[in-house]
Amino acid sequence: MHDKNQAPTPDRSSKDEHLESYRSDASGQPMTTNMGLKINDANNSLKAGVRGATLLEDFMLREKINHFDHERIPERIVHARGSAAHGVFELYEAIPEFTKAGIFNDTSRKTPVFTRFSTVAGSKGSPDLARDVRGFAVKFYTEEGVWDLVGNNMPIFFIQDAMKFPDLIHSVKPEPDREIPQAASAHDTFYDFVSLTPETLHNHIWVMSDRAIPRSLRMMEGFGIHTFRMINDRGEAHFVRFHWKPVLGVHSVTWDEAVKINGADPDFHRRDLWDAIDAGQYPEWELGLQIIPEADEHKFEFDLLDATKLIPEEMVPVKIVGKMTLNRNPDNFFAETEQVAFLPTHLVPGLDFSNDPLLQGRLFSYRDTQLSRLGSVNFEQIPINQSVTAAHNNQRDGHMQMQIPKGKTAYFPNTLGGGCPYLTQISEGAFESFTERIDGNKIRARSESFVDYFSQPALFYRSLKDWEKAHVADAYTFELGKCTYKHIQQRMLWMIKQIDEALAKEVAEGLGMDVPDTIDQPINQAIGADADVEKQQPGEKKIYLDKSAALSQTHLKSDTIATRQIAVLAADGFDGDDFTAMSEALKAKNAMVKIVAPHGGTITCSKGHEHEVFAAIMTTESVLFDAVYVPGGKQSVEALLKKAKYKKFVNEAFKHCKAIATDGAGEKLLDATFAGDHKDDAAVFVDGSPKDFIKAIAQHRNYDRMEVAKMVPA
Ligand code: HDE
């Protein structure tokens, strides 16, 4: 316990462990009340006789129940469902020519970070595999103050102006009359809004792509989205966009898997992140910058201030400058992951905003939202939110003030407090906003330079591989198929036609509809009342780049199988030699080898050794694994054939284009499942080598199998 007169202050000498002084550990400690009174009975309330009524006097009961009654705080209005981890950011090379920020200049620093990933639409308890954007928020505890880079796993956003954010979110959230559906965009109100708001189409097509159903939070990109500024020590500015590139590559599950994972393990992503860190397999992302000189602001065919546009990497390359490693799970979900408050206004000298009207709105919203979530203007004193730099100012009091300021003065300027806290010069590290010349009318309108809604969704779609395109078509068909109003479906089909005609036709076919030739009113509902309606109508899509390779998720592959989950389907009598050779090869590459047996406990191999079962077949599902291995052993395979679920397991793995390997009699399980029709030399190996199997797992999926897989009976 800390001294009651002493405000708890973090250990600033060790920034990696700056939260340490707040951690409490009850091991070896007696149970007490909130005031430290030792307790001898935590099971019975105080009564008037053992069978009598409970007494109001029982302050221990009241304290316990009262605290319990107030355990919940409001969940985040967006991004409620999230998981987080601690880690460090390390800089590869200093970039003083672009920014004076310490974090980008000192390669010896290990800047502590806390990173929270989230879905957007669902409630706190919603399943992880919702088709949705993922939040990717990083808090850097830098030596100059906290910098929050609060981004997403897609490089663009749905809307251009903060004014529309509540509308966007209200449309995607459960419909207000019945509070349906949870964590799903496939419903009328969302498509009513999207079909009337063409600026949403770009982010929307990303959501229809596999990016919206990641295999793991560790296998997705992150983006700061908005254009920010970097300022060097000469006061010169460059525009910058931030990118996180996952070292494990970018991978997704299929929609069929997502639906099933949500039932089999709704905490799939949360568990995956925790387990990987727990196993010492620390996820890593490289930080990349797209840097644009101020002079080039108007050189693009889109506006840098428009958050619905990305800057193709072919036009401005991503310069990799450092790496983030997540290496520690939180100790307590509520205290850390739930109470962490990310604010785009948490900024450090050397960085600044741009005038992106979406970003500008965010600058208000995040501090405001913390007041209803965390309940007090003192939320930055909560341990997870504290800066490692000391905070001194004349802000005073408020709910839950945790500090005990000393002295007489709470104003500036003063003489009675010795002029403290005092002001700092820019040259000594004070924050300064970039001086920008602004010349314009006060006006409520959208810039004409923002009015191009079809060029970039079309660029994205053109840049995808065939299997990615097929998934997009399926996603549109699924989502629009869930809409019950024909006019909404028709407007959407017209919108999709502006992206790609063949895509619109394919979706229309699935809906049993035709693609309409026209829609009957101006399509842009986003314009201000006085704006010129004609000028605000998007024209034909532009083609300033045929394809951008970086937009296909295949551009970031990796050849590692570390942390991949391999199901070994086996029963008593399985071939011990086969198994040992395969599992040692897989484990040597840090894959997770897990036996799925007809029952829990242990099974015995042909060598007489006992092996621990990870899961009984009835308690798990194929979709929770990345690959399947069936060792030989007649007795074992015969036992597997007696349980129909094993055939379903293998069939699903095949349909989901995963790598499958068998040894010896293991092939019989494939024969029984597919009646001999399981041809896929690239990723199905009968008596194949572990090396080939490993190579195929590293490819994540063999999507060339998609056409074949459709023909395999379910
Ligand atoms: Fe957010 N957003 N947002 N957002 N956002 C919140 O703040 C908001 C936007 C993002 O893990 C809220 O503390 C407005 C873009 C993430 O805790 C809230 C607008 C991007 C997270 C809020 C946007 C984001 C949030 C809710 C339009 C990507 C979760 C809880 C002007 C660049 C952070 C909270 C975490 C959370 C408002 C648009 C990312 C309500 C008004 C664009 C990752 O303040």
Image (cartoon, grey):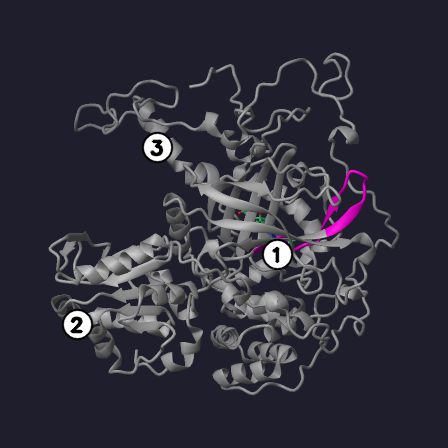
Report the side of 418 relative to 498 (left or right). right
Q: Which one is nearer the viewer's eye here, 72 or 501?
A: 501
Going from N to C along the chain, the mark reached first, 2 or 1, is 1
User: Does 43 appear above or below 597?
Assistant: above
Residue receiving disc 2: 641
Going from N to C along the chain, the mark reached first, 3 or 1, is 3
Residue receiving disc 3: 65
Local secondary structure at mark 3: helix
Q: Tag on residue 166?
A: 1
- In the rendered image, is residue 648 in sight? yes
Disc 1 residue type (three-letter): Pro
Residue 169 in the image, given as x and y percentages of width and height: 57, 58
Q: Place residue 154 in its image quadrant.
A: bottom right
Report the side of 181 relative to 579 (left or right). right
User: Magenta segment, which residues?
Assistant: 222-239
Q: CA distance from mark 3 to mark 2?
A: 53 Å
The stretch drawn in magenta includes residue 58: no
Label 1 C-beta lies within 8 Å of the nearest ligand 1 atom: yes
Quadrant containing the C terminus is bottom left
Report the side of 203 relative to 468 (left or right). right
Crowdedness of circle 3 by 10 Å Cα count: few (<14), some, many (20+)? few
Q: Which one is nearer the viewer's eye here, 34 or 264?
A: 264
In percent of the image, x 34 and y 26: which residue is there? Answer: 26
* In this rendering, the label closer to the viewer, 3 or 2: 2
The stretch drawn in magenta includes residue 226: yes
Going from N to C along the chain, the mark reached first, 3 or 2, is 3
* In this rendering, the label closer to the viewer, 3 or 1: 1
Residue 89 in the image, given as x and y percentages of width and height: 56, 42
Q: CA distance from mark 2 to mark 1?
A: 54 Å
